[in-house]
Image (spheres, grey):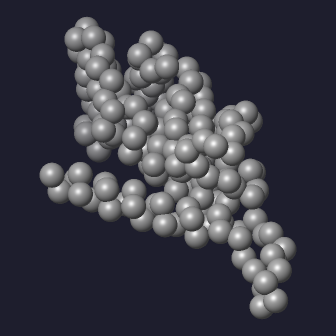
Amino acid sequence: MVWIIVGLVVIANMFIIIECINAPVYDDQGYPMKEFSVGSYELGQLAGEIIEMKYLPTLETDMLKTFNVVKVDDDELIENKRLNDILDDSYGFNGGSGDSTAAHKNWIDHVYVLAEKHLPEKLECKINKVNPKNMDSFKDGLKTYLWNTDLSWYMPEDDFFKPNHKLTWCSTIILTRTKQ
């Protein structure tokens, strides 16, 4: 129940921030001031936070999880656990040889096979309508946020933002699953 309340408060604050960032700025005589790209990066970070909370999937085998956990087959879960145990045993601080390169490659190859099998190639996310002034800065903010979560299998590509229609309530962001 607490998480629901916290989520609602965060979302309410996001509406306020979006309105402040997108609001036009006027000088003392009432003329619109020159538009600056300040805020697009932060707006991208905010979009990333909304996407993380609402859309971002993680696999059942991932150590960190979002609210959207994708189940894998029991055989895949057992194989992932086996490869993870081999990787853990290869570390020097766990009594292994200290050469974990081969074990890490086997484990990461298996993880990417699971992601390719169970996660969609594209992830379509609808967030509150945003109008970033600088799309490159917005994309950088979104990428940075998603990367820093350590949860994301997805990143924005060049065609990630669908243009807004003036009557829509939302913006559509399309993320692409990362490749190995």
Q: Residue at x 22, y 11 (%)?
A: 74
> In the picture shown, does residue 15 fall above or below 146?
below
Q: Nearer the viewer, residue 116 or 41?
A: 41
At horizontal 76% and vertical 56% (from top left) the residue drawn is 134
Q: Say whether residue 98 is left or right of residue 152.
A: left
Q: Is residue 67 above or below residue 104?
A: below
Q: Position of residue 28 (x, y in %)?
A: 77, 91
Q: Is residue 71 visible?
A: yes
Residue 84 shows in the view: no
The residue sitting at 59% across, 37% down in the picture is 172
Does 135 sit above or below residue 36? Answer: above
Horizontal and vertical percent for residue 167? Answer: 64, 43
Q: Position of residue 10 (x, y in %)?
A: 37, 60
Picture quadrant of residue 175: top right
Work out whether residue 89 or residue 142 is closer to the camera in this orientation and state it.
Answer: 142
Q: Nearer the viewer, residue 77 or 33?
A: 33
Provide residue 166's location: percent of width, then percent of height. 69, 45
Q: Is residue 42 left or right of residue 135?
A: left
Q: Nearer the viewer, residue 49 or 10?
A: 10
For the point 43% across and 44% down, which residue is it? Answer: 52
Tally of marks: 0
